[in-house]
Image (cartoon, rainbow, N blue to C red):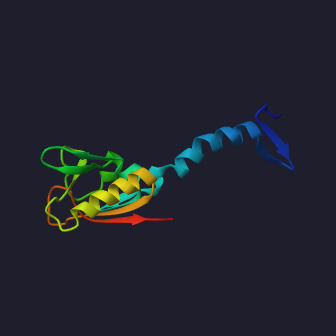
Amino acid sequence: METLHQININGYRMFTMKKLIVAGAVFFPLFFSGSAWSSCEENVCQGHAEVITPAIKANAREVMVRVQPEAGANLWCQLYEGEYALLDDKAKQFDLHRSLFITAIASQSDIRVEFDPQSSVCTVSSVELIVP
């Protein structure tokens, strides 16, 4: 006996269109979400800028970028205040790093960020803006 949610075609039970639409609505956003395409491993993060580093912050002492907890969970370094990676203001390319972060966030581009492996606190050593 067939139920309202299944139809029988050539002996195979098939889901109705309603169930396929519901399943698609649930799995499509999960599959194509930014976090699925963004990851951090060891001392490198790569993916959508708005997922990995959605904000840049400056105070009287530091310039830093916020790293999403999900993205930064696998980093070898510790995030400053539990959510920030520092930009080294003494670095030769400090202004360029800061500009690349702002550009990546504003344009919603992909980004690759490397952190100094010698530092226990996550400190940005390299920024690459990946243009489609």
Residue 87 in the figure: left or right of residue 127: left
Q: Quadrant of residue 124?
A: bottom left
Q: Nearer the viewer, residue 51 or 75?
A: 51
Q: Quadrant of residue 29?
A: top right
Residue 42 shows in the view: no
Q: Nearer the viewer, residue 4 or 19?
A: 19
**Residue drawn where x is 41% and y is 49% of the image:** 50
Q: x, y percentage for residue 51?
A: 40, 49
Q: How many marks?
A: 0
Extreme residue in the top direction = 4
**Residue drawn where x is 47% and y is 53% of the image:** 36
The N terminus: image quadrant = top right
Residue 57 in the figure: left or right of residue 37: left
Q: Nearer the viewer, residue 27 or 3?
A: 27
**Residue drawn where x is 82% and y is 35% of the image:** 2
Q: x, y percentage for residue 94?
A: 22, 62
Residue 47 shows in the view: yes
Residue 73 in the figure: left or right of residue 48: left
Q: Is residue 20 above or below residue 64?
A: above
**Residue drawn where x is 23% and y is 67% of the image:** 93
Q: x, y percentage for residue 106?
A: 41, 51
Q: Quadrant of residue 48?
A: bottom left
Residue 123 in the figure: left or right of residue 114: left
Q: x, y percentage for residue 37?
A: 46, 57
